[in-house]
Amino acid sequence: NYFAGNLADVVLGKDTLAEYVNDNSAFGPLNGRVAQRMARGRFVLDGKVYHTYINDGRNSIHGGHRGFSKVIWTVKEYVAGGDSPYITLYYRSFDGEQGLPGDLDVYATYQLTSPYELSIRTNATALNKATPVNFLQHVYLNLGGEGSGDILGHTLQLSASRYTPMDEELLPSSGRVDPVAGTSYDFRTPTPIGARIRQVKGGKFYGYDINYVIDGEGMRKVALARDGKSGRALELWANQPAMQLYTGNFLNHTKGKGGKLYEQYDGFCLETQAYPDAVNHPEFPSVTVRPGQVYKHDMLYKFSF
């Protein structure tokens, strides 16, 4: 299919549903109710202490051991034909699920808005209690094609002049928001992902696993990634305040599609999100959604070649 406009599968993943159910590398899920890491799996909201499921060392990650990627969603709408096919999924997250308060109505719409554009629109309404909410789409990308090797040669440009430094547990424990200028985290101009990857650590591995504060607000361009060899590029737009850059540091003989094995740096993730562990950092923008309020997270993946 390389002759048909140089198309390839650019998303890392699995072959079977069972492999996705048992997957612990987060290949492609919509993570929630509270994605990203939460220190000690606990937080205080309106004077009450809540404990969530610990599944990342001493902390919780991506909503706990049975987050949104491990539950059954209902198909609300499905339009297969036409110029912009889409599917809308619904999930009622219940009071006390993974230790989180209140019932939450969640909708996620995946739509091909043009032949090479994927729109993902999510919203969540708190029904009866205030609750933290932070969704993220955990897609591993390789613009050279999944299983084609590492992504270190991809160039990346981020609309981010600040980042939140992480500790060895990948938590923003200092609460600082620092400028990227003069650091190995500076992708304000297009730079190969691998150019400075040995100068940064995400926990115990070399590589990026870091949260950026995206300049501006509203729906805006977040990132531009390009693979020179194939000529493929991705422009990502989103309406969230932040984005985690993750360079597949933990991949290690990880079984993928078609019997392929994925190794370290064979994929990268651009995870638009709220600030990580915002529940424990009053200095970060709040992730609390109160009854009747609606959380909205929109993403647009624009591919070109």
Image (cartoon, helix red, strand yellow):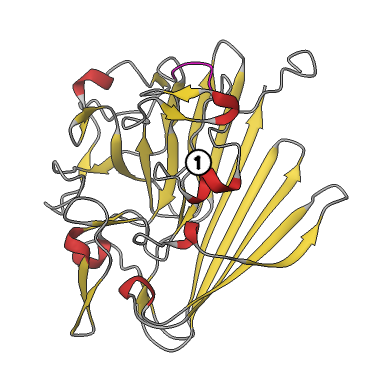
- Residue 289 located left or right of residue 77: left
Foreground: 235 or 199?
199
In the image, residue 147 lies in the stretch drawn in magenta? yes
Determine the residue positioned at 45% across, 45% down: 23
Q: Work out whether 19 lies above or below 225.
A: below
Q: Please indicate whether residue 16 sits to the left or right of residue 207 in the image.
A: right
Report the residue at 53% width, 21% height from top.
147
- In terms of secondary structure, what is the magenta stretch mainly? loop
User: How far from the left and from the top, in percent, is residue 34?
Assistant: 37, 63
Furthest residue toward front: 18
Asked if the stretch drawn in magenta spans residue 144, the answer is: no
For the point 52% across and 26% down, the residue is: 142
Tell me if I can see residue 146 in this picture.
Answer: no
- Is 232 or 101 nearer to us in this picture? 101
Report the amino acid beneath label 1. Answer: Val
Q: Quadrant of the C terminus?
A: top right
Q: Residue at x 32, y 30 (%)?
A: 249
Q: Start and end of the magenta stretch?
A: 146-150
Describe the element under mark 1 as helix, strand or loop. loop
Which of the image's four quarters has the N terminus? top right
**Res. 129 in view:** yes
Q: Quadrant of residue 51?
A: bottom left
Residue furthest right as drawn: 82
The answer to whether 5 is drawn above or below residue 100 in the figure is: above
Q: Examine the rendered structure and indicate whether residue 299 appears above or below residue 88.
A: above
Q: Nearer the viewer, residue 222 or 142?
A: 142
Count the marks: how many?
A: 1
Residue picked out by circle 1? 139
